Image (tube, coloured by chain):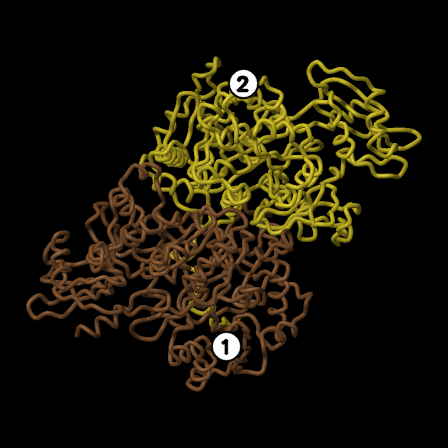
Chain colours: A brown, B yellow
């Protein structure tokens, strides 16, 4: 190949081309704002200089026990300071952080430890019995580092090394290096597969750095945010916010468990400015007793998942919280799209505005594209708000692929796009609106029924707290909608009233034929487990 | 090489790896906010959809006249709408934009057209005589596109094609593509070399995109800023703000010439939120008659170059403007560092705060490093505020190199760092403070005297508008400081008083021995031309 004048003698060198990586962010936070508080947990405070030094020691300690580039470092931890440090230490030596969902059963954890080939495992004391069982089920023999927490009653240890002692074994003057290639893996997140084995989603340094700053750009975060950890860091690396908070030189307010009393107490005490969560987290804050909310206002909140019910939007508004709805998947580092607001929407009614804001919208600035394609032809659907297709992504905030699963990776990237599995339409303004997961769609008498559309209506019923609609096999129609409903405290209603309510607002064929009252099963991140409901209706 | 599990079957593909490029930003601005105003010039308004379409047509029109990847598209234009479009159109087909300083003489422009091998040249009518002469001096025979502007009296044309007609020759449905490689060149900026030929600094798509969003992050710009073009777009691509404004979906308020009456009028009329400029631009706003300033407040301003004099800082404060000082060079895409503020500085006196804020500080978030090294040993200087070294940069906001100048490129990148040529110290908090350009330092009786330090003192004198200090050859001392001073309107002083003023504030050997009153020569971007002063003192 002949080089043109803009290529010849204008190669990359170590002065003009460096890997994009979140490691840069913590190094700078520590260099420029060494004494700012980086992490708060109960009475514990660490400055950025301290978190940086501790992360360096962690990297060095891992190196000393033989961890190297491409090795997996697993963690079963709640949102405590060690979890923040784990988002930096392993990356500094090219190792890959695998944060494991703390609500999983031992079998699932055993699978992940084996599949990810964990070489080290950091365990919170609360989960020692669970992990002991998981280790008895798997072949992997990771080095166990117990993370002690004297704020809980559990005092069992699993291994022989405690986290603070382990840190001390690392060199205090360890100097982290950027990865040679920004495409190197930084973390591994298993998706909660409803069928088959979980898939290991691999993130890279480039994507982690880009998404970290993208969070600031999209949310308009100022420098030095006070970020409350209601979202689990084990979920899509807390949507990359450990890296975002470092880049914005903010403060991580750690929280072992979401508890409304504690949440409001921390918000008030530390002047929290930002937090993220599933709809259920926000709903529980709204439904908390008024006296808890005293003195807490103006907090910015992100909600991911399906559009939040109108009651949540109204409730947040009443509390003086600023709610932004975002959309994404584990494969896109968490949210990578949102319904970018337009000033003229302010003139709409709350309900109309909620419809606009509740959409999946448009891709984030640094995610190249999100669109709706016919998965057969890979052609875009018309912007008519009616024609359904599959949401697909392209861009730098998209996983490397699934670990040791070429088939699933190839399928996910078929045709040069990442296939989300979510069905959606494009509205006239080019904004994407989700209709359903492909597997959640209900086909009744040959007509497609979006379970989300029915749930949206159910959520507007004053007695309904949570609603989930799944397909019930039906001799005549093939499938019919069956609703599972969790009522608000003290509320009463019945099947007949619910069905009547739906018939006033929906085409009759879309209305539930059956209504079941009771607790709706949810994952640890607040997602409704429809596969369990489907089992129940059979 | 054996691939590890995080590399095998986890390659880059078109769904998960795309070039970082400002092209993405304009495409999104047009897709998400098609009807928002992108460009304002006199009575002209273009929406983002329109600027995008016009840029696409421009790309297509260039392609039709044979322009392809690696070709140079030159422009001699003030800050008018066509200049915004030129920051996108050529990039869409891999061509490279060379914006030429409109204040240069014909000889310098002829050199650039030849050296850059310009294939097309866009010319503003005001500069037709200048360019006619330049073309008579050079070998290059670019296609000439005249950019008509009925707001000026000039009505001469140089070529046969007018900009609007040229746009019409492009396809309206042209679809831009991202570069295959984000390392591809996007623009060419000649530095105003004081000795020898100008050097052509080459920027790449990756750096342009990263610096564009970096501007938002560092300045804390909200979405939809109203940006007034006081800074020339021909200077470091207006520090990359054409790309920043697109990424923030803001509005470009164009301005052919900096004129204080016009500046305040536009600020008031369009509710301008942000602008950038050399110290002289801010000083002239401060010194404008009070009645012009009515109704203009709360504007955010960036000032680059040496620390702004205290009077400028105070003056901006009085106007209710928020001034931020930044530092960089053409080779670092304009500013790539700044004195990141600390809340506790608010407790300091204005003078102390000005000293802190006026430093070159620390690298931008997305520029990896800025530090002060001994250029001989390449070792960092101690953080003592005294030991001088050379400011050096490393990171992704650093040029590819100098066009067709391997020797200068190699020198600039010697030892794996970009050498700025600026002499500085590191203060105790790790912030860099510039002392001088290496060639501006005055060596008197074996002692180094920073011309900047002397100028800082002179600027504090109430009668002084602009001060510049250069070395005057001296038989006894080798060199001694000679001050050139431009007085504020209506102010009177004399050499004796100035020297006395300096002696109260500086070591005596640092004080000017000679003072010359009169106009100080400046470049079009407001930089003082010390090489002319040095000629005068000889």
Q: Could you tell me if residue B503 is visible in this image?
A: yes
Helix, strand, or loop for circle 1? loop
Percent across and percent down for residue B263 are: 52, 22
Quote the CA–CA distance across marks 1 and 2.
Answer: 69 Å
Picture layout, residue A538 above or below residue B69: below
Picture layout, residue B276 above or below residue A361: above
Residue at 38% across, 41% down: B27
**Front label number (1 vs 2):** 1
Percent across and percent down for residue A153 are: 50, 77
Give the chain letter at badge 2.
B
Percent across and percent down for residue A461 are: 21, 56
Discs 1, 2 touching: Cβ within 8 Å: no
Q: Could you tell me if residue A5 is visible in this image?
A: no
Q: Which residue is mark 1?
A: A153
Residue at 53% across, 20% down: B127
Viewer-closest of A151 and A386: A151
Residue at 36% across, 32% down: B47
Viewer-closest of B126 and A528: A528
Viewer-closest of A6 and A529: A529
- Determine the residue located farthest toward the front in the rendered image: A291
Picture layout, residue A147 above or below residue A469: below
Q: Which residue is mark 2?
A: B292
Q: Badge 2: few (under 14), some or many (20 or more) residues near its Cα, within 10 Å?
A: some
Label drawn at residue A305: none
Give the chain letter at badge 1.
A
Q: Badge 1: few (under 14), some or many (20 or more) residues near its Cα, within 10 Å?
A: few
Q: Is residue A509 left or right of residue B131?
A: left
Give the quarter of the image for residue B465: top right
Give the quarter of the image for residue A24: bottom right
Helix, strand, or loop for circle 2? helix
């Amino acid at each position: 190949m002949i080089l043109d004048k803009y290529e010849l003698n204008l190669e990359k060198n170590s002065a003009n081309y460096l890997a994009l990586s979140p490691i840069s962010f913590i190094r700078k936070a520590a260099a420029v704002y060494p004494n700012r508080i980086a992490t708060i947990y109960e009475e514990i405070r660490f400055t950025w200089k301290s978190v940086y030094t501790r992360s360096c020691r962690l990297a060095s300690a891992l190196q000393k026990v033989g961890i190297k580039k491409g090795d997996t470092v697993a963690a079963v931890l709640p949102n405590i300071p060690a979890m923040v440090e784990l988002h930096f230490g392993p990356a500094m030596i090219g190792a890959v952080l695998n944060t494991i969902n703390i609500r999983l059963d031992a079998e699932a954890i055993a699978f992940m430890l084996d599949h990810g080939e964990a070489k080290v495992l950091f365990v919170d004391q609360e989960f020692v019995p669970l992990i002991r069982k998981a280790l008895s089920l798997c072949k992997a023999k990771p080095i166990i580092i117990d993370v002690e927490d004297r704020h809980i009653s559990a005092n069992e240890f699993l291994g022989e090394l405690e986290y603070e002692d382990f840190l001390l074994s690392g060199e205090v003057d360890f100097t982290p290096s950027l990865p040679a290639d920004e495409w190197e893996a930084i973390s591994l997140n298993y998706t909660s597969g409803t069928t088959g084995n979980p898939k290991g989603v691999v993130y890279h340094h480039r994507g982690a750095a880009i998404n970290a700053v993208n969070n600031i750009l999209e949310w308009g975060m100022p420098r030095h945010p006070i970020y409350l950890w209601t979202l689990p860091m084990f979920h899509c690396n807390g949507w990359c916010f450990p890296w975002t908070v470092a880049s914005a030189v903010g403060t991580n307010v750690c929280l072992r468990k979401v508890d409304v009393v504690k949440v409001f107490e921390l918000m008030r005490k530390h002047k929290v400015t930002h937090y993220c969560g599933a709809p259920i987290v926000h709903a529980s804050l709204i439904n908390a007793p008024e006296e808890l909310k005293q003195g807490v206002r103006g907090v910015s909140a992100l909600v991911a998942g399906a559009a939040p019910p109108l009651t949540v939007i109204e409730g947040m508004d009443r509390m003086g919280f600023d709610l932004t709805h975002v959309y994404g998947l584990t494969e896109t580092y968490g949210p990578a799209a949102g319904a970018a607001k337009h000033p003229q929407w302010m003139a709409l009614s709350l309900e109309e505005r909620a419809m606009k804001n509740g959409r999946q919208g448009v891709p984030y600035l640094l995610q190249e594209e999100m669109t709706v394609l016919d998965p057969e032809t890979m052609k875009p659907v018309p912007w008519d708000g009616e024609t359904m297709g599959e949401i697909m992504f392209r861009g730098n905030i998209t996983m490397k692929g699934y670990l040791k699963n070429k088939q699933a990776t190839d399928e996910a990237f078929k045709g040069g796009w990442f296939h989300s599995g979510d069905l959606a339409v494009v509205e006239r303004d080019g904004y994407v609106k989700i209709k359903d997961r492909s597997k959640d769609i209900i086909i009744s008498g040959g007509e497609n029924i979006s379970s989300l559309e029915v749930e949206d209506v159910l959520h507007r019923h004053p007695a309904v707290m949570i609603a989930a609609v799944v397909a019930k096999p039906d001799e005549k129609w093939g499938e019919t909608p069956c609703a599972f409903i969790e009522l608000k405290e003290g509320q009463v209603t019945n099947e007949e009233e619910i069905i009547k309510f739906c018939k006033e607002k929906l085409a009759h064929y879309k209305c539930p034929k059956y209504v079941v009252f009771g607790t709706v099963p949810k994952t640890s991140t607040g997602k409704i487990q429809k596969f369990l409901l489907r089992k129940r209706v059979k």
